[in-house]
Image (cartoon, coloured by chain):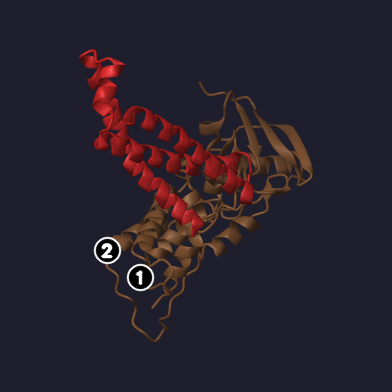
Chain colours: A brown, B red
Amino acid sequence: MRDSNPIQVKVWRGDAAGGAFAEYEVPQQPAQTVLDVITWIQRHADASLSYRFACRVGMCGSCAMMVNGIPRWTCRTHVNKVRRDNRLTIEPLRNLPVIKDLACDMSQFFEKWKRAEGHFNGVASRDQPVAAISPREPARRAASAAIECINCAICYAACDVVAWQPDYLGPAALNRAWSLQNDSRDRRQVERLQAVSSDGGCLQCHSQQGCAAHCPNELNPTASIAGLKRMAGLSFMQKKYREPHA
Amino acid sequence: MLELRLYLAQRISAAIMAPLVLLHLGLMIYAIQGGLSAEEILGRTRGSLFWGGTYGLFVIAVAVHAAIGLRTIMAEWLRLRGPLLSGLSWFFGFALLAAGWRAVVAVIGG
């Protein structure tokens, strides 16, 4: 039976130096999301609450938080699906330093994206014809499977290896690297493969699949990382590992 | 590069161990069915190049595989790094090799 009492919400308040939970009672609304709950608290209970959001429709990847211990995109998470005994506990994302309250410092997440060579390196100019890539090509299909990442860092928060090894690149950066390793127009695949298979790279993954279990876009970074491992191992055994790109 | 070598060494040693574990389990079940005594089993294994080679390979694969696995656990849970991490990994690898080698010698030699 649906409980129409106010939702009991515990929100982590604090900064890098530490903090504690504050409790709020939030009235229920139809089709209420966790982001709606936080917004209600900021507008009606405590205007000093800091949190981050932009699009509200699951595209921008900025509103991820821990909800009852699980990393989720709060704008697309309905309260009815996640409350337990009419209670919600909302914390900043795991594995990232807190700036204030529910807003994390995402710098390391994006730094690792760069360390994993997560940017496209093409050589064709706008005067050249568009590369003809069949949607049925295996590499194109592998890239397509990994491509819909919104950089929300939910996988990064879900990953135990990130918690144990702070220099581990993490699922999102490695997933991005995998999509570029399968892009036939990219010209830095040898360098990228070195970047993602050195210390803190894809070989550290234990395949626990926390990333895949929690990815809101239902991507499977574990599969992408397995692909990178395979690629690195094969290139090593074929003695191509150190060769510069032709 | 070290990480990649270790990764491959662990996968290759796992691939060697998988059939050997099955062989070992199967052999144990088979050997006790007819009520073979320890003496009778040793009579079959002593001086056998096949069993010496099989279990010798098994022991090497275990030492490599376990040492690399323990290295990861020590790095992640104990936050060990550098020479201490390498030193302990080598130590566990050699300790397993020595203990395993002793068992192989006991079964094959004498």
Give the secondary structure at mark 1.
loop
Q: Amino acid at mark 1?
A: Ser
Disc 2 is placed on an element classified as loop
Identity of the residue drawn at 22% across and 15% down:
B33
Residue A231 lies, with reference to residue A9, above or below; the image says below
Query: What residue is disc 1 on?
Result: A184
Horizontal and vertical percent for residue B105? 37, 32
Mark number for residue A137? 2
Q: In the displayed structure, would residue A100 be above or below residue B77?
A: below
Q: How many marks?
A: 2
Nearest to N terminus: mark 2 or mark 1? 2
Name the residue at 67% across, 41% down: A40
- The picture quadrant where one finds residue B77 is top right
- Quarter that holds the C terminus of chain A: bottom left
Q: Residues within 10 Å of mark 2 (few under 14, many from 20)?
A: few
Disc 1: which chain?
A
- Label at residue A75: none
Percent of width and height locating residue A231: 37, 59
Residue A175 is left or right of residue B49, and the answer is right
Query: Which quadrant of the structure image shows residue A28?
Result: top right
